[in-house]
Each structure stands twice: as structure tokens, then as C-alpha cells.
Image (cartoon, rainbow, N blue to C red):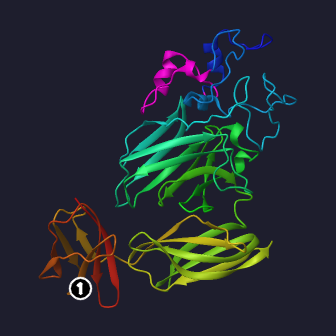
Amino acid sequence: MASNFTSSASSLTDLKALSGDDLSSIGASSGDMSKFNGAGFTFDPERMFAAVNEGAGNYLDIDESQQESWLVYAGGTHLANIIEDFSGTARSLDITENPPSLGAFEFTPNTTPIATHQIGAIADPGISDFYVGNRKIVSLKWNENGGSLPTSVKIHYYPGHQPPDTDGYPVFNGYIQVDAVGGSDYMYDIELAYEPALLAGISTNDILLTKRSDEVNDWSTWQTTVNTVSRVFTVKNIDNGFSYFTGTDQNNPLPINLISFSAKILNGKIEIRWETNSEKNNDHFTVEKKDINNDWRKIAIIKGAKNSNTIMNYSTVDLNPIVGTQYYRLKQVDTDGRFEYSYIVRVDYGTNKREVFPNPFIDQIFIKSKGEKSIKRIELKNIMGENINISTEYFPQDKWKINAPALQKGTYILFLYLENRVETRKLMKQ
């Protein structure tokens, strides 16, 4: 530490407490190490440094080949007129570029970031928190949603790195990568922590979560809640798996500014409406609906205004809703082919006059209907759409028993063919 450093702290322990115990306050006490150690990684503060003997020439220089170096990478603050570190390496003054590293030396780790340490099991209901050192980076709240949860999740945190395939877009100087094993049809709420050093000039009032799909250059944004006190931002009810996550600027994430998106029942159909107050190079909208296999399919294409600074109203109608919950989203495509997705809206359509139980089931399913012989045909399919061999028995007062022995555990779709429509139910086999 510099000889002219002044603080109200009388010890490093006090200094650490004054710093707020955030990601930039990494200590080497036994208490800190107990927080870092876990998930197959052992934290050793001595490994962070290339040399720890005074007079060696690189005293307390960071060893960028060690995973520990990620704990203090890109955690510094831009200081006026400080353009070099102690070794003469350039240090940027531009907050939109990579932030300075913490400490006296600039460096870039050349290893994979430390895998986060998980606290909290993957369960519904349940919350899993993921830590880098003593800083919670990610929190996941689980919802099976009729499906199954992942068996494990691994998270890597990349502070100070440009998110993949985001050139030309305002995004954070950092991102997380989430890899999940197993699971299907589940949903989750995600809470991400942010550091001021990584905002890249984006105002905390304008943070919007953006998530990359498995396709290159396909980043989608989500309706986001920001807590500037806890330094976290949250998105609820994500239902399309995991990938890369970062923050972007809500003032410039898309070629359009969507101010409303809704769906409602109208005259037996479902009307989808949305409104923009500005558009730039907007070619068209695709309205997508989630089908019974949880795949998104196109139901309408609506031409955009291309360029507009006035309020524009759009609408379309889903002519073929099925009884149950319907999910819709917008895919906005600009003139150069880039596209983004809106948040998801849902509508509960129709009155369920048929009871299907139990769910989950073991080897028999029962149906009770209020309409005499209203069911004309019954089919059971797996999530690949393949028919399952079943036998059915009919009883008076429109009651049915379905025998489906020897099925593998998993998700199945029950089709009830009525006089003028088809109803579906998602079922789980125990």
C-alpha cells in the first residue's frame, strides 16, 4: 500500500468492513477462505501473486495464470489522470472500456474463471445462490412448471470481458455463463449482481437483462427490475433454458421501443395487441405462440413502420386457441436481419369441464367430464409427438379410465378430442 494512504481504519480487517464486503474486498483470512473453498475449488491467497518476497522485482504482481486472479480482476475504479500502473502498463480512463484491475498492476487472467460456489439445492420450491468469493453473483428461484428441474447447474463469471457477439451494442463489461444438466419445461426467476465498475457507462436506471440463445448473434431482452441498493437486477418466469447473461441499456437494446404488449379473449378468439412509440429500421414483427410441446411457432407476420417517432398500434388474432393457458411473444426483425424477442404474455382460455387426475400418475389416468359422452377420442403422446399405446374404459356419467403401464418417467401430453375442438393436458409419469 502507498505510504500516503489514509483511512479511518486501523487494520486491514477494519478496512475490509468499511469497503462494504463486496467483490472488491477480497481478504485472506481463514474466514474468507472458508467462503471461497467449495465446488471442487480451493482458494489459496498466495497463488494470486507471482512473488510475495519483497525485493523480488515483481512484489505482489498478480499471477494471471492462476484462477485466484479472477477474484480481483476488473474490479478497480477509473481515476482521473492515472494512466499507468506501477509497471508502466496503460490504464484506461474511459468507463465504457474494460475497467482497471484491482491493485497496483493491470493484468488479464488467461484461465477459465472460478466456478461459483452453490448454496441451496435445486428444488421446487427453492432458491439456489451462487457465489464468487463472498459476493453473491446469481440467484435462481425454481419452478418445475409441470416439467423437471436440472440435476446440476454450473456458473462461470467473466468480469471485464465483452459478452460474445455483442459488438456495436451497449452492454456490460462482463457476463455470466450458465450451463445446466438435464431438466425440461421448467421456469426460473434470475437475479444477477452488478458492479459499478462493469456498467460501461450504462445508467443503473436503464439496466435491462439480455440473454443469448444457442444461436450466434441472437440476444433477447427481458422486462427487468433493478434494485440499486442491493446492486442486483431481476427477471421473472424465464422458460427457455440457460446460456449467457449480461446487462444492456433499455434506451438502445432494440430498433424499436415497445411500450405495451398484451393478449386478451375477444369474441371467442384471442386478440394480441402491442404499441411502440419509436421505431428504427424495423422491418416486421412475428407473433409467436407456444404449442403443446413447448415449442414456439409462428402465427402471424405484421409489417413494421421501418422508421417512426410517433405512437404506432398493432394487433392480430389467434383464430385457433385451445382450452388452457396460451403463451405469446413478439419477435421483432430489423432491416438487416437482426432480431430480438419481447417478454412473454399469457391468457387462460376456456372453461375446463373435464377433470384429469392424478398428476403425476403411476400407470392409470382418470377423466371426469360434465358433458354426457362429450369425449369422442383419447390419445396420449410423448414430448416428441409420438403416440403411446393405451387402453381406455368408459363408465356411466362420462367417466373414463386410461391404462398406461410400463411407461418411462417423464412428460406426456393427453389429447381429448371433443365435438368441435381438442383439449390437451400436460401430465407427468412418476
The reply to whether the magenta stretch includes residue 35 is: yes
Q: Is residue 69 above or below residue 421?
A: above
Compared across the picture, whether 125 is left or right of 374 comes to right
Picture quarter containing residue 380?
Answer: bottom left
Q: Secondary structure at mark 1?
A: strand
Q: Magenta part of the protein: which range?
A: 22-49
Q: Position of residue 150 (x, y in %)?
A: 38, 51
| Residue 347 part of the magenta-drawn span | no
Q: Main secondary structure of the magenta part?
A: loop
Quadrant that contains the N terminus: top right
Which of the 4 image quarters holds residue 86?
top right
Q: Where is 59 relative to 271, above or below? A: above
Q: Amino acid at mark 1?
A: Arg
Q: Quadrant of residue 426?
A: bottom left
Residue shown at 21%/64% (left/top)?
A: 358
Residue 275 position within the rendered picture, expressed as x and y whole percent measured from the top left: 68, 73
Q: In the shown orientation, is residue 422 left or right of residue 302?
A: left
Residue at x 72% of width, y 56% of height? 169
Residue placed most toward the observer, 200 or 13: 200
- On the rendered structure, is 395 left or right of 81? left
Number of numbered discs visible in the structure rendering: 1
**Residue hosting label 1:** 377
Asked whether residue 86 appears in the rendered view, the answer is yes
Please provide percent x and percent y for residue 228: 66, 41
Residue under the image location 50 percent in, 43 percent down: 155
